[in-house]
Amino acid sequence: MDKTRNDTDHEELFRQESYFHYLSGVKEPNFAIAIDVHSAKTTLFCPRLPASYAIIMGRIKPPSEFRDHYEVDDVKYVDELESFFSDYVSSSSSPKILLNCGENSDSGNIYPAPELTFKCVSGITNTTSLFPVLADSRVFKSPAELELMKHVSDLSSQSHVYTMRESKPGMTEWQQEAMFNHYSHFYFGCRKAGYTGICACGPNAATLHYGHAGAPNDQTIQEGDMCLLDMGSEYHCYGADITCR
């Protein structure tokens, strides 16, 4: 879901949710997806945008364009979800809808299930079965995923080398972060970073997650300082994590 900064029309840089991207490859916000687990038929649901969208945000793509681009079986509008599920329920002898919901084993955070308030799906939703299957599936990478991960690791390494070569006493830590982000974006199209960069010089390197808003890579590098650079680029929702000293 896309977001705007409170009380403004400033649109935050959108990053697709990882499970949704894994299943669909869709980079745009406000989409939904339904996959028939028996036939693998995949239906995307795109937002029905008003004509005024084109004036501010650009050309409105028709569903057929999304269908061809993402190579799915069908694309409908999000406001057609209820009729889609109603047709599914009426045509199935034992309808069941699996919703992605579960607990992250590392953080303990709960991945919330999509909100389906349609009467036609009452009593037939399952929020326990899908999440562990998808979480396990994402552990095992396909050959294409492995190549993508190699690519983002290689370009992140090149960005580190560039940053180390250009760093010198008198620079600030945030200039190191800027050089890394510039190189990976300018030469490889990585608009987003895999995580908040850590550029810690001197004693700052002893802080595990230095670089956050309370300590924003803002110290000046002194002669003789050791620098710890912990940064990684992200490309199509696949990221690298590299630390150099």
Image (cartoon, rainbow, N blue to C red):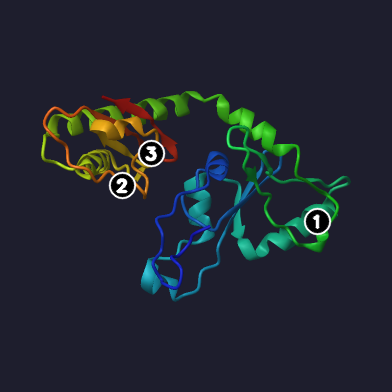
Question: What amino acid type should be assigned to the residue bearing mark 3?
Answer: Tyr
Q: Residue at x 38, y 38 (%)?
A: 234
| 189 vs 41, nearest the viewer | 189
Could you tell me which secondary element the residue under label 2 belongs to?
loop
The residue beneath circle 3 is 235
Q: Residue furthest right?
A: 93
The disc placed on residue 121 is 1
Q: Are marks 1 and 2 in contact (CB under 8 Å)?
A: no
Could you tell me which secondary element the residue under label 1 belongs to?
helix
- Eyeballing the image, is 230 above or below 111? above
- Eyeballing the image, is 51 above or below 245? below
Q: Quadrant of residue 219?
A: top left
Could you tell me which secondary element the residue under label 3 belongs to?
strand
The residue beneath circle 2 is 216
Q: Residue furthest bottom?
A: 52
Disc 1 crowd, CA 10 A, few/some/many (<14, 14-19, 20+): some
Instruction: Decide if residue 157 is in sight here.
Output: yes
Horizontal arrangement in the rendering, residue 174 relative to residue 63 (left or right): left
Horizontal arrangement in the rendering, residue 218 relative to residue 166 (left or right): right
Q: Residue at x 46, y 75 (%)?
A: 51
| 36 vs 99, nearest the viewer | 99
Q: Are marks 1 and 3 in contact (CB under 8 Å)?
A: no
